[in-house]
Each structure stands twice: as structure tokens, then as C-alpha cells.
Amino acid sequence: MPGKLKVKIVAGRHLPVMDRASDLTDAFVEVKFGNTTFKTDVYLKSLNPQWNSEWFKFEVDDEDLQDEPLQITVLDHDTYSANDAIGKVYIDIDPLLYSEAATVISGWFPIYDTIHGIRGEINVVVKVDLFNDLNRFRQSSCGVKFFCTTSIPKCYRAVIIHGFVEELVVNEDPEYQWIDRIRTPRASNEARQRLISLMSGELQRKIGLKVLEMRGNAVVGYLQCFDLEGESGLVVRAIGTACTLDKLSSPAAFLPACNSPSKEMKEIPFNEDPNPNTHSSGPSTPLKNQTYSFSPSKSYSRQSSSSDTDLSLTPKTGMGSGSAGKEGGPFKALLRQQTQSALEQRGGSPHRFCRRREFPFFTLTAFPPGFLVHVGGVVSARSVKLLDRIHNPAFVGIMGNTRSYKLLDWNSFNSDEPETRDAWWAEIRQEIKSHAKALGCHAVVGYSESTSICEEVCILSASGTAAVLNPRFLQDGTVEGCLEQRLEENLPVGCGFCHIPYDELNMPFPAHLTYCCNCRKQKVPDVLFTTIDLPTDAAVIGKGCLIQARLCRLKKKAQAEANATAISNLLPFMEYEVHTQLMNKLKLKGMNALFGLRIQITVGENMLMGLASATGVYLAALPTPGGIQIAGKTPNDGSYEQHISHMQKKINDTIAKNKELYEINPPEVSEEIIGSPIPEPRQRSRLLRSQSESSDEVTELDLSHGKKDAFVLEIDDTDAMEDVHSLLTDVPPPSGFYSCNTEIMPGINNWTSEIQMFTSVRVIRLSSLNLTNQALNKNFNDLCENLLKSLYFKLRSMIPCCLCHVNFTVSLPEDELIQVTVTAVAITFDKNQALQTTKTHVEKSLQRASTDNEELLQFPLELCSDSLPSHPFPPAKAVTVEKASPMGEGNFRNRSAPPCASSTVGVVKMTPLSFIPGAKITKYLGIINMFFIRETTSLREEGGVSGFLHAFIAEVFAMVRAHVAALGGNAVVSYIMKQCVFMENPNKNQAQCLINVSGDAVVFVRESELEVVSTQQPTANCQPSCPGGEVTT
Amino acid sequence: MTSELDIFVGNTTLIDEDVYRLWLDGYSVSDAVSLRVRSGILEQTGATAAVLQSDTMDHYRTFHMLERLLHAPPKLLHQLIFQIPPSRQALLIERYYAFDEAFVREVLGKKLSKGTKKDLDDISTKTGITLKSCRRQFDNFKRVFKVVEEMRGSLVDNIQQHFLLSDRLARDYAAIVFFASNRFETGKKKLQYLSFGDFAFCAELMIQNWTLGAVDSQVDDMDVDLDKEFLQDLKELKMLVADKDLLDLHKSLVCTALRGKLGVFSEMEANFKNLSRGLVNVAAKLTHNKDVRDLFVDLVEKFVEPCRSDHWPLNDVRLFLNQYSASVHSLDGFRHQALWDRYMGTLRGCLLRLYHD
């Protein structure tokens, strides 16, 4: 399917002065795609040139169309010397390659220079004509849609969810090539930007091919990251969930879907394996969920446990309490064995590709109702790897079994390299899979991967939530499926996912189970940790809140193996402490479940940092959490006793205060009904993690607290005292503010339309004098707390509001520097309504959950293309613009029209969420995936590091908005800043920053406008929507 | 633990009106922080001083980045870097170009040159306005002046188009430009009682009636330069006071009409000739640039002060000036009725505005 790419350069504006003599510029433009370059005429002496060029046509393969970016360079013509570059625009033309997205890219793009930043704008029109040529051997994957959104996109219906897709490509980093010593920083930066763009394109194409192979047509939850490995190269990797999506094009099609999309789903998560419940005994077991409560696998386990003792899951002792690991090991082994047999069955099944069944992972965090049956808990795995150096070609990977080679000859490299990285990841994924099996789960949802690199050491991490997915989604709507569905309906709504998927008598770890407080039929754990969003049908009491665990550990500076060993020795302790902190804070909040858990371990030269963020909630199904008790070690000392009791009182007060603050007032449960005592709930871990040193050695770390009945904090030294203090130092957000790191805030459902997305970056320098673990912890804790306080202060005019999708990233750019980057969105909500709903909340929680569900899933009405311009007021544009503009502070809608209301720049909203409150997304225009480098050699003149980075981030936002507007969109959803690497050298007056962002460009329509339109045009739904160009100017 | 870097970037640029005002007023970050602390914001929000410091720094940085764009407001509208709702853009521009009464009175009518810029130190000390703020205001005046100086078309329209100011502010700037290019003296002690508003009012009347633009709307600088021909012609009015018969006739016409209507009739009657001479001589002198500059000094000396010393109420001044201008139409021997109206119409308006304590 070759195509013809057509580009027209219309005009420029606000160009910089390139000729000091005349204060003007003689600008012309080079348009480059692949190896073909066109030039416009030189437009003499103007800062606002009107080139109005002909259509430049490139005839290219679609493979190139997918890989290559369109490169537009604006230059200043100089008769006597070399032409000076003003700046560049890279345009990803991928959105033009599938039919439902954008048809034309047209608009003003900021002209970007890696040294000077944005220097004026250029108006460009880009079109693509694709020719059908189906006979060719497919190397391209045009037509596969990509979404960053980690749920089924709003105006689509999932026909099949196929499963996990991943790919990575490796290249050398231009910054580390020998040529970099002689070329300018600009040339080097541009080479890097171009390379990453090229690699992203290639990666996306390859993933697309895999999706086509699976007969899917889209990737949802697409997450692409790059690892700057320094001298050993540059890795671009991506994971996603392959799906077959149907566009909802008419109300007839989507109205039923919005009430119960699940009915129409035919999901095949990883195989059509008829028996995903791997813990049920043998193939003859019927496919009933009810089998969970019985335990057929108990006997089964006894039969086979001895045969598998040498499996790789043998726990490594000496980490955590270890006791559970010993108990759990064999059972896990058993489960794994079962699974293996199940996998084998699958492998043999006809008409299916084995490869994609390899990992039953889903990058989605929100699911259609009914998809998620049970949630086991968080599974995570980490691995420390040593990146090879060029002059060490046959270097053996540190941990014995993983060998990675690097070829000396760069030219011939690329055959081995991806495989090494692939093997690393495959190893980690394998671990994740086995952890999930151990929890009696056959799938992992909310799955994500990340890395942290410092010099030649790299920590690979993966985490997700072990889950059981509904068997009926595994089949193609057969009679049995219907039967299943009927059975399913008997199950209570809102608590099913909390019920344990593993076998009660063969628990993978010691856990305290009670009967579900909601349905009283099934067993539930006392605490639940997950990486996914709160299911829409979950019954929640009160509101949720952001919970963070923060931890630093000093580490000796070391080289290579020694360093890697030191890190791997520290990791389990960090995980343990992070987990303990999370658990303490959760209890302090009086809550019993964590959603959206993300634990980030960052490695630096001389320290390790751990930051865990999650949203705590009180699940109605889970038992009331017990308090925290403090015990002292020296009971004889009277004043000490007093101190302890004082602390105890403080903690109890805090818990009580938090319960009030978050409106947690669960109904009283009489114990007899439950039939199992709950007054002393024991703290249990759902977190199963491992830290692997080789592919054959998997470590289980038991994070539970042994056999203690109550949750007791022992204060035996000053450290422990510090810990307790730090628990109490976390101040709740000021009144009117809520925060969470999930998509939506549990307990708030009446969002108003004002949103404000922001990125905040802080870097602190530690004084090297007091580098103890405690001082470090305190500094880090203060850094995060102060950052949050600043955010609350800055956004105070939006009260009542909620910070959603709060995403913290920590990096350690240098020895004594800690950098924290936060991206989140503040959304206002209606307080009055909130009060009403919370009053009746307890009684109606179930009912409300189901209505919520409907609200959330109501799909947007489609609009005719002319619906937007048909705004009742003549200056429709200005009015819409004003309406859509989110006010940073205060409400200015009542202000009189300003003299400059004729603004031609359309508002583009950005949000890390998958939706826009008060609006319906009518169209997805394609993925935005951009990578920028900015460098300066005049740091002081640009306002120091803060001035430099502030300007750069503002520019990145501007470029994202411009691209979205050019595609005809008015918002970016699921926006994420994946990387923000900042390096400075104040002595040389230099700084450099790399930023990678992505998101989905969309068109949204305000619900208020929709109503107007739908009353005017009741038949407005018959045409596919394309209000493109609405905001393009 | 020191903060090396601390930034906040919103998709919609956050503008804090209070901090913007402090920035415009030229306060340093630390001064601004202490002023904010004094406003009681910490108690209201429960924030700490560190938070306030960080917030103020952040806003200052944003304003600093916006300043370049504010120098050419249309750029602010079309730029892509800062997403700012139109109403906020308007607010930013309007506030940036707003000026202090005390400051404008110091520089009104002065040449907007480097020399004046050097005096800003003194002005700052005298008015208590920070030097930074003085510089901004002065540079605004100068920038607007430079842009519209040699432009065709209405002064107010040009200013509005190039600086996107509100009508009110654009008119004020037109007055500033008009005064600066004609160098009217406004700093004399006897003029100290006059406000900028008084001068701006006069400037508007003069622009409407006395400039080139009043007769021909197709010339450059039409609203800035006074109509030289008109000023030359004003010499003709001299006969109103030089010709004794005409002066007597004029006086009797005015006195007849105003008898019984004026509280200060006798004073008026006694002073008529002096007043009339004053007003007509001002007109006749306007051919010289030096005298144009002293226009307001002369008006106050020759008319406002004599009336004021006799305690004329404003209403009497109005009645007198109306009658004084109108009666000329009944003077058969006087042929320059149109010229008189163009002169006196504007002058009457100005005098009434200038006549206060």
C-alpha cells in the first residue's frame, strides 16, 4: 500500500530577526521526507513570510510513512555564507494513515530549535493518498489504531480483547557517537530527536504488525518508553493491549452498549482456553465461578507437590520474614505446574498463534463491567542488570545466567542487541506470570513496565494486578456463555472482584480472610492492593485519598558488579519498608484497599529512592481495618510508657479524624452474621514481589508481619520513632481539596467542566554533611509534602476540586540532587451535589455504583460535521473558545467581552485522564508521541535552571497543542509525560533537558452544546462525525 | 536542603491578579512575599511562607516570560506558548499598560527621550513609585508613541489596534502621545492642581478639533500634529480685542444677555475686557511653538485664576463662556465665525474642565 504524501507550506509568522542590519529575515523552507527534499522560494525581508508553495509530493512506501517523520526546516537565506537554520518542525503523519482519524493536518506549528526554543510559527498543510495494494508482503501496519488510553476508548466498543503486545528496538545513541565530538550540540540534538522519532515509528509499525497477526485492529493502553543507556545505546520499547474495536457510529449501536457493553463483548484475553481458572482441578471441572469456594485443588496439590520441588520458585531465605515464602513455595509451584499444563493445552489449540498467548497481560486499568471477576493482588518483579560497555564485548551479565553481548562494531550491530533486552524483559514477565499463578489468577491487569538507569546499572521493573477474568469473555457468545451470564447475575454487584481467587486452604501466603461484608457468601482478604482503577461497580464508602510511601536508602558508590550486587541486596529491604509504610498509612486513613498502586524504585550513584503512590479507599466488601498499636521495648520506664501512650493517642485521634474527613462510616456489622471474627483484623500482604538475579532464581518476599494478631508497631529505637513520627507528619490536603492517583476520585461523581492540567518539577540539593538515612528520608518526605502543599496553594481558586491522576516521578540526576516531577489534573466539582450524594451514600452505595456505571459508560452522541459551526451566535468561534477555556484562577465568564476576543488560537485541553468532564469525546484523531531536546549554553541569561525548564515545558505543551489543533482536535486525553531528564552544569552555564510526552488527540463536544444540537437536530446521528478544523487556525 | 529548581507549568497559564499587581508595581520577590504575608493569605489558606515564596517566584517567572509578548500585545493573542483565556489576556494587557496618576503627571508633555528616562530616579523618589514600575510606565508611553507616531488614521484607533487596549485606556494613551509630541507644559506650579484626567479631556477635544485630522483624515500624524494653518489663521481673531468698537459691542451683547442671570455679574462686567483679551491673545500667540507649549499655563493665568479670585461659581463660568462664544455670531463686522467656533468650541470645553480648585 504505497502512498503519496503531499505537503504545502503556506506561511510563517513571528519569525526571529536573522539579519541584524535590516531587522528582517529572508526565510525559506526545506521539506524533507525520507531522502527526498523540496524547497520553497526565498521570501525576502519579512518576519511574516507568505510562501504559499505548490504541493510538494513524496511517493513513498507505507512502511516509510509509518516510520519516518515529516521534517520541515525553516532557514534564513544568506548570499555570502551558509544559510542559517531558524528551526524545525517534525510532523508524525501516522494519524493520516487510518481512515477514521484525521484526514488532513493543517495549522500553525511552532518552529522549534533545540538551542533557542520556539522561534515563530509556520503554517503547513499535509495530506496522504494511500493506494490499495494488498498483494504485497506486509511490512507495514497502516490502519491499526493506537490509543494511550488504558480503557476502551469512549466512542468504541471492544469486540475482542486479544491481549499483550510488546516490542523493542535498539540503536546507538547519537550523543555518544564519535562524530558527536566534532559536531555542534544542535546537530547532535537533532540527530537524537530524529532517531527517536524514527525508532518510535518503527516500533509502532512492528507492534501494529503483531496486532494484525492477532487479527486485531487497535492497540489500547499503548505505552512507549525509551531508555537512555548512555554509551551502550538507546532502547525504545512499548507495550500495549491488542483489541478489535468497533466504532460506535449510531445511537442504535451504542445505546445498548452503554448500558451493558459486556453483553456484546467476546473477549479472548489470552486464549480460548475454556478453563482459565487454573486452580480448579483438571479439565473436567465445570466453568463455574462457584468452584472457588470449594477447594478441589487441595487434594490435587498433595498429589503433585512432591514432584515439583525443584521448580524455580524456591524462595530465597533471609528476606522479609521468609516464613510465608517457605509455606507458599510448594503451593505456588503446584499452581504454576497446573498453569503450565494449561498453557500447553492452549499451545496446541488450532487456529491460534502461540506467541501472543505467551503473557496473559493487559495494560488496561479500567474494564467493561463484568470483565474482571476477581482480583488477587499486586504482582511485581524487579531485576538488576548491568549494561555493557563497548570495550567489553563479551562481557557476561552480572547475575550469572543472563549473558548480554555488545558488538564492538556499531555498523553491524542490531541483530543481537534487541534480543538481549527482549530476554531481560521476557524473564521479568515470566516471573510476573508465575506470581499471578501463585495467587490463583490466570491474568495480569493494569500491567506496566519501567526502568531506572544510573551509569551502567539498570533496574528493570514490572508490576500489575493478578486477576481472574470472566470466563464468558473467553468464548464467542455460545450458549454456555449465556448460561454463565445468568449464573453471574446471581452474584452480588460491587464486591465480586474482592473475593479471593486463590484457594482458601492453600493460600500462597498467610492471610486473614473473612466473609465478604457485602454478600456474606464469599471470602475476602482484609486488605487489597491493586494497580488498576477502582472498578466502576465497586461499592465504596466515603471518599478516597492519595497515599504515598517514600523511602531513601544510602548506598556505597561502587563499580559494575559490586554496585549491582549492592543494589540487589538493598532492593528487598526497600520493598519491604515501602510496603510497611503504605500499610501503616492506609490504616491511619481508616481505609482497606489501594488502587492504582505504582512503586517506583530509582537508582542513583549513592542512594536508592522508593516512591509508592496509590489511592486508598474503603471498600464496603472488605472488613473494617483495625487500628495501629504501639508497643515499647522498655516497659519499665514510666516516662517512656507515657510517651508511648501519648503517641498511641495521637494515632487513634488521627484515624478518627481521617474517618471523618473522608466520610468513612461503614454500617455496623454484627459479628454473628459474618461468622468469622473480625475485631482483630490482621495485616496481610497482597503484594507479591520478587527481585531476580537470574532467570532461574526467583525470590518471594513475604511482606506480611508474621504471626502477629494485631498490627503492632514496635518502637525499639530512634529509627522506629522516626517512622511513627513521619506517619503523623503527612498533613491532609486543605479543606475543599481531594487528591488521588487514579482516573477518578472514589466518592465524587459530580464533576464540573473546569480542568487544569499541570506539570511541576522540583530539584533539591542535599547537603552532603548530613547524609544519613533518616536525614535523607526526611528531606525526601519534605520535598514531596511541600510540593503537594504548593500545588494546593496554587490551585486554591478551583476549590472545591480534586487532583486526579497525580503522577510522581523521582530521578536522581546527580550525586546530591533529587528531582521530583509531578503531572496531574485539577478538576472542579459541585460541592452541594457531593454532599447530597454522600449523605445517602452508605445506604445507596450499591445502587449508586450501578448508576455511576451507566453514567460513565454513556457513549457520546455523534454529531454531524456541521453541528459545531451551527452555534446560535454569529461569532461562534470566539464564544466557543471562551467557553472551553479552563480558567486557572477564578471565574471570568462573567467578565465583559475583552477588546481582544478575536483570538485565533483555539483552546486545546490536556488531561492525563481518559475523559473530559462535562463533555463527550466524539472522535479519536490519533496518538501524539513527541520527543524533544532542549539545550542551552546561556543558562543564567535564560533565568537559571528554573527559567530554562519552565520555558521548555511551556514550549512542549505548546507543541502538543499545536499538533492536536492541526489534526482538527481540541483536546489531548491520557496525556503523560513519560520522561523529563534534566541535566545541568551551572559552572559552564549549560543545561540540557529531554522530554517525552504522549497522549490521544481527540475531538470533544460539551454536553451542554450537545443538548442544544440534539434538540435542534434529532436526526443528527446518522452521519459520522467530523467537526475537524473547528479549532484549527 | 536547598531548592535548586522549582517550577509549575499549567496547560492554562495561571495568572494570580494580586501577584501580577505586585509585579507591575515593581516589587522584588522578597518584598512581594512579605506584602502577601501581610495581606493575611497564610492564615486564609494555611500555607507556609516557603510555599508563598515558591508561588511568587513562579508567577514572577511567568510574568517575566510574558513581558516580551506584552510589548506587542497582538503577539500575545497569536502566540502558542501560553494558553491564556481571552479575558485573561485582556486583563494582562490592560494592567500592563495601566499607569499611575502620579507618574503620568510627572512626564506628561515631556519629551519621551533618554534624558527624561534619566529623571525617572527623581520621579521615583518623589512619587514613591518603584523605579521599576516607573521604567515600565515610561517605556510603555515611549513604545506606544513610537508605534503610532507617524501613522495614518485616528490616534485612538491606532493605539487600540496595535496595543489592544480598552477604549478608556486607548484614549488616555492618545492624550499622552498628543501631549508628548506637542510638548505642552504641565509641570508648572500653577498647573499642579490639574489632574491627568483634566489634561486628557482637553487633549481629546483638541485632537478632535484642532489637528490635521479634524479637516483631513488621510494624512500621516493627523491626530498628533496641530493644524498649522488653523493656528496661523487664529491671528485673525485679534481684531475682537484690537478693534475697540467690536470689543465694546461684544461686551454689551454678553452683558445684556447675562444680566440677572449671573451671581458674579458685576465682576464679570468689570473684567470682561481683560478676560476677552486674554482668551484672544492666547489664540493669536499659538503660531509660535513656544507659546503652544505654554497653552495651559496661559489659560490658567489669563482666565482660570482671575475668575477664581473673584469666586465665580462653575455655572457662571459656563453661562459666561456660552454667551461669550455665541455673541460673536451677532458681531456683523466679524467675518471669521467658523474659525472662532473651531477655536472657542474647544477652548470653552477645556476651560470648563480646567476650572476647579
Image (cartoon, coloured by chain):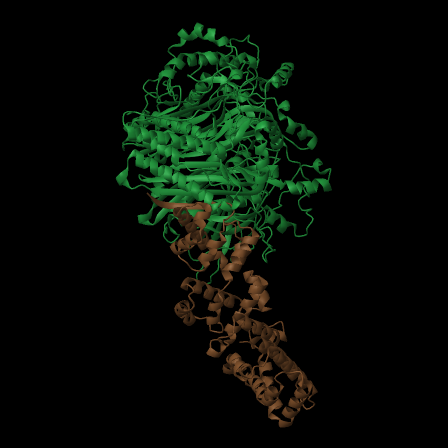
Toward the viewer: A889 or A541?
A541
Q: Residue at x 57, y 80 (%)?
A: B228
Tell me which corner region of the image, top left, top right, bottom left or bottom right, holds residue A811.
Answer: top left
Name the spot of residue A453 as percent of width and height, x first.
36, 33
Is residue A858 visible in the rendered image? The answer is: yes
Residue B13 vertical position relative to residue A520 in the rendered view, above or below: below
The chain drawn in brown is B
Q: Is residue A747 left or right of residue A871?
A: left
Residue lying at the far top of the rendered structure: A303
Identity of the residue furthest to the front in this view: A638
Q: Taking A598 as reference, is B209 left or right?
A: right
Residue A613, above or below B278:
above
Is residue B25 shown above or below A460?
A: below
Q: Position of residue B28 (x, y in %)?
A: 39, 57
Residue A403 at x, y = what percent?
Answer: 35, 23
Given residues A313 and A938, the one toward you in this image is A313
Chain in green (letter): A
Q: To which quarter of the image does residue A724 belong?
A: top left
Residue at coordinates 57% horizontally, 63% vertically from top-left? B160
Q: Judge by depth and name the residue closer to the eye, A930 or A105.
A: A930
Report x, y in % for residue B79.
52, 52
